[in-house]
């Protein structure tokens, strides 16, 4: 269970608190993905990140804007890039081979 403390008025605020609280964990996981992505998914990390953004960013903007704002908040709260945080958010819950052609 994650316990974050602070005033939350939006999905962005919640994401910011999560990013700030889990900064070190997020950094380590993104470093792990950078280092091991090809072995795990048979494609480069950068390629998967570009495909994920191209395929799903517009969809999430239309269907789950609150989730997207939470990811933006996590990125800002952890001082990591939005793109890395976006891919990291989905790397453990789905087969990222779906980002292959």
Image (cartoon, rainbow, N blue to C red):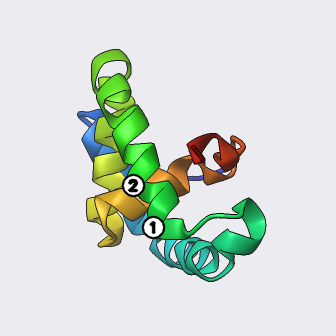
Neighbor class of circle 2 (other Cα within 10 Å; few <14, some 14-19, many 20+) is few
Q: Who's the residue at 76% across and 73% down the image? A: 39
Q: Is residue 62 above or below residue 43?
A: above
Give left or right: position of 3 versus 59. right
Give left or right: position of 62 versus 56. left
* Residue 74 % position (x, y): 36, 55
Give left or right: position of 28 versus 9. right
Tell me, yes or no, whether the two marked residues, 1 and 2, touch with CB atoms within 8 Å. yes
Badge 2 is on which residue? 50
Q: Work out whether residue 99 or residue 34 is closer to the camera in this orientation and state it.
A: 99
Task: Name the quarter where the C terminus is drawn.
Answer: top right
Neighbor class of circle 1 (other Cα within 10 Å; few <14, some 14-19, many 20+) is some
Q: Is residue 79 above or below residue 14?
A: below
* Residue 18 % position (x, y): 44, 55
How many labels sit on residues? Answer: 2
Q: Who's the residue at 68% across and 47% down the image? A: 97
Q: Work out whether residue 19 or residue 45 is closer to the camera in this orientation and state it.
A: 45
Residue that lies at the very extreme toward the top in this rendered image:
63
Gap in angstroms between the C-alphas marked 1 and 2: 6 Å
Residue that lies at the very extreme toward the right in this rendered image:
40
Q: Quadrant of residue 81?
A: bottom left
Badge 1 is on which residue? 46
Secondary structure category for the residue under label 2: helix
* Residue 62 % position (x, y): 29, 18
Q: Work out whether residue 97 or residue 11 is closer to the camera in this orientation and state it.
A: 97
């Amino acid at each position: 269970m994650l316990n974050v403390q602070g005033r939350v008025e939006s999905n962005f605020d919640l994401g910011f608190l999560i990013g700030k609280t889990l900064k070190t964990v997020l950094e380590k996981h993104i470093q792990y993905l950078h280092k091991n992505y090809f072995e795990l998914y048979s494609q480069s990390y950068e390629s998967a990140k570009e495909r994920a953004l191209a395929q799903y960013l517009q969809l999430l903007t239309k269907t789950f804007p609150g989730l997207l704002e939470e990811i933006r908040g996590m990125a800002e709260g952890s001082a990591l890039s939005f793109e890395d945080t976006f891919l990291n958010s989905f790397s453990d819950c789905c087969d990222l081979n779906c980002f292959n052609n």
